[in-house]
Amino acid sequence: MSTQIQRRALVTGGSGDIGSAICRALAAKGAHVIVHAHANRARAETVRDAIIAAGGSAEAVAFDVADSDATRVALATLLGAGPIQIAVNNAGVHDDGPMAGMSEQKWARVIDVSLHGFFHVTQPLLLPMARTRWGRIVSVSSVAAVLGNRGQTNYAAAKAGLHGASKSLAREMASRGITVNVVAPGVIAGAMSTETFDRDAIKQIVPAARAGTPEEVAALVAFLCGEEAGYINGQVIGINGGMG
């Protein structure tokens, strides 16, 4: 981060395991972090309070990224205080099951949050960001979008959509000093992975023989959001212990 100006960073899904680690990492680099939650604002406020207690700067917001109108209203309020130059699209939901038995509702909700949410959040930020001639947009995808995963056609489709959107947006915004990248985590320790994988399963599918940590993902995201990553653009970067 520049020492001259405190950049504002919005992290969607900022109250979860990976999201809160990203919020803390960006705050430690000097950003003012806007911690987003979907419905549970109290969780976002807990992350905000921890950042402030550690000497950082943060605020908490809550809205549904899948709701275009609600997102636009929330962002208009935030942009009233100035441009948001760092956007981390981390919000996402799982609703797994074989596609042969998948309902349209289950398909749509997962795509609404990850892919439509990316548009709803990112699009209003672009012109204010471009006027500053500096910006960082990072979306959190999944190894499932790269390799595929049984029972996750909806999730893999949603996250893979971020790859194409981000590569295209990178070409549109690069001349304005804005980078657009994707990180694709594998098995990361936390509430979601513990429900899905036991230790033996992780040893079988991950060459590193362990789950990654939210802090390892956050370190990569924070790097991509920094000054030093200005020539990394339009990339999908895996962080998966060698899965592929």
Image (tube, rainbow, N blue to C red):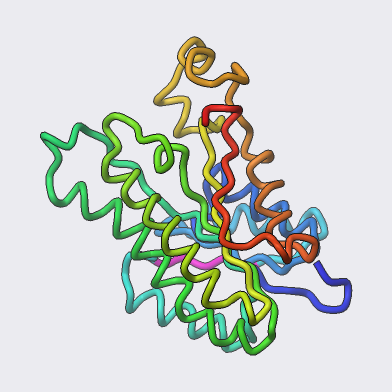
Q: Where does residue 200 sit, x and y in percent of width and height? A: 49, 10
In the foreground, 15 or 210: 210
Would you say the magenta stretch is mainly helix, strand or loop?
strand
Say which quadrant the N terminus sits in: bottom right
In magenta, the rendered stretch is 59-63
Residue drawn at x 57%, y 33% is: 240
Q: Would you place residue 89 above or below residue 104 in this image?
A: below
Q: Where does residue 153 sit, x and y in percent of width and height? A: 27, 40
Residue furthest toward the top?
200
Q: Where does residue 227 sit, x and y in percent of width and height? A: 78, 66
In the foreground, 41 or 189: 189
- Would residue 82 be visible to someone looking at this image? yes
Residue furthest toward the right?
3
Residue drawn at x 40%, y 37% is: 144
Q: Would you place residue 186 above or below residue 106 in this image?
A: above
Residue drawn at x 52%, y 57% is: 139
Quadrant assignment, res 203: top right
